[in-house]
Amino acid sequence: MTDQETQKIYLLDATGKFCPTPIEETAKKVEEIEVGGIIKLISDDPEVFSELSAWCKTNGHRVIGHYVQNYVYTIYVEKKH
């Protein structure tokens, strides 16, 4: 079994909320999950990707994927510690 098959994904829907709220909710969720867990953040805030990327870099976590569809961002964050 690969690491990806054993990682749990936690959904965090922050649509309709604007920064800093999606970042604050991500930070709270990171504290609740295990190391290696992945948060799937959904947000329609146009600033969320740059803000979340900066937060991950500052806090030692990692954006492992993202995409945008119809102005809605889906971002995957891996808890590193």
Image (cartoon, grey):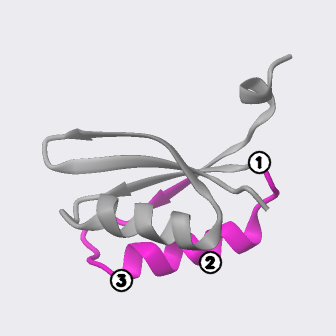
What amino acid is labelled 1 in the image? Gly
Q: Secondary structure at mark 2?
A: helix
Q: Is residue 9 visible?
A: yes
Q: CA distance from mark 2 to mark 1?
A: 16 Å
Q: Residue 64: horizontal and vertical position, in percent?
A: 53, 41
In the rendered structure, which amino acid carries the disc numbered 2? Lys
* Extreme-right residue of the structure: 1
Q: Residue at x 31, y 63 (%)?
A: 50
In this rendering, the answer to whether 15 lies above or below 10 is below
- Give the label on residue 20, or none: 3
Q: Classify mark 1: residues with Cα within 10 Å, few (<14), some (14-19) or many (20+).
A: some
Q: Look at the image and give the residue range highlighted in magenta.
A: 11-36
For label 2, count other residues whose C-alpha is less than 10 Å away and answer few (under 14), some (14-19) or many (20+): few
- Residue 73 drawn at (x, y percent): 29, 50
Element on which disc 1 rests = loop
Q: Is residue 65 above or below residue 18?
A: above
Q: Is residue 40 left or right of residue 66?
A: right
What amino acid type is highlighted by mark number 3?
A: Pro
First reached walking from the N terminus: tag 3 or tag 1: 3
Residue beneath disc 2: 28
Question: Horizontally, is 63 left or right of 35 in the view?
Answer: left
- Asked if labels 1 and 2 touch by Cβ distance under 8 angstroms, the answer is no
| 3D distance between C-alphas at marks 3 and 1 | 24 Å
